[in-house]
Image (cartoon, rainbow, N blue to C red):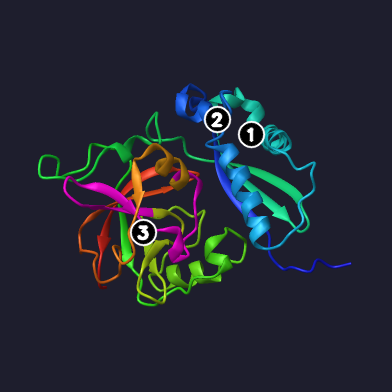
Amino acid sequence: MSSPVDFQLISTTRFEGRLTELDWNTHAFNGTPSPYLLLAYHYDRLLDAARIHGWPVPPEFTLRILEEACNAAVTADSTASRLNVLERSFRIRILLSYPGILSVTASPASPLSSRDPSALSLWTPSPSSPEPPPQDTLLLVVHLDTVATPANKFTRTKTTRRDHYTASRNRFNIPPPPTPSLDDVLLYNDDGEITETSIRNIAFARGSPPRWVTPSASTGCLPGVMRRWLLEQGRVVEAERGELTRDAVVDGEYVLTFNGFEGCRIGRLKLGS
């Protein structure tokens, strides 16, 4: 019998040995050092997405099962045996199919550019610190989209149905992930409220003193795993109604972007062509 749905739930994390040295990543994995970036949060997001889409999830789908599947994917990689696994970096793609069939793949990835992928969230642009701290990665260029992306279940959950994100990237000739690119697109809903970028959550420096403000979940944005952690730590706060709109962003302003694979990055907004 064919599946009643034509999409899968998805989450993408990172495997990197250095993550076991970060206390905050250990705390987020129930106190156990983990080479996966916020894996327990990815698990929670998959369960939340299943509930939103009304999928039954087998009780045997546990965090332990997810971790074991990720471990199997890493060791199955044909290049992993050439070096100690913990010396490698992998992009971990987790798929959950209806009604709860799990599959995980691992592909080699570039290592993190800094020891702590959350570190850039500690900086906010201010008169005393107008430029971002030195970093090994180049600034992202974040283009304001020209078309609204309506909020729905597929913006609130991460799935393989990503036509709306692909369309936004196509408008700026940005290749689809995982092809590397320094360009991204800033999305907004039908009410003109900023939501996210095509592959990242985002925050803007607002207020005095400035703090990082991220779009509210009520906008229909994806509640990403790094976003959740940053909110829990108070490093970002949710925007008030109408605080972040397409008409209120400023050309050239610095933004903080983040997701569950690369952590935090700094970008700069670009309006117009």
Q: CA distance from mark 2 to mark 3?
A: 26 Å
The kind of residue tagged 2 is Arg
Asked if 154 appears above or below 158 in the picture, the reply is: below
Q: Is residue 22 something one can see in this rendering?
A: no
Residues 191 and 163: in front is: 191
Q: Quadrant of residue 43?
A: top right
State the SS at label 3.
strand
The kind of residue tagged 3 is Asp
| Mark 1 crowd level (few <14, some 14–19, many ≥20, 10 Å Cα) | few
Where does label 2 land, which residue?
Answer: 88
Q: CA distance from mark 2 to mark 1?
A: 9 Å
Please report whichever mark, 2 or 1, sits nearer to the chain's N-terminal start.
Answer: 1
The kind of residue tagged 1 is Thr
| Mark 3 crowd level (few <14, some 14–19, many ≥20, 10 Å Cα) | some
Residue 191 is tagged as none
Where does label 1 land, which residue?
Answer: 79
State the SS at label 1.
loop
Q: Position of residue 32 (x, y in %)?
A: 58, 23
Q: How many marks?
A: 3
Asked if 140 appears above or below 260 in the picture, the reply is: below
Image quarter in which the C terminus is found: bottom left
* Residue drawn at point x = 59 percent, y = 49 percent: 45
* Residue drawn at point x = 76 percent, y = 59 percent: 98
* Magenta-colored stretch includes residue 80: no
Asked if 33 appears above or below 219 in the picture, the reply is: above
* Magenta-colored stretch includes residue 203: yes
Please report whichever mark, 3 or 1, sits nearer to the chain's N-terminal start.
Answer: 1
Residues 219 and 181: in front is: 219
Q: Position of residue 173 (x, y in %)?
A: 40, 69
Tell me where the magenta segment starts and ends, as one range. 202-226
Q: Left or right of 75: which side holds 87?
A: left
Where does label 3 land, which residue?
Answer: 183
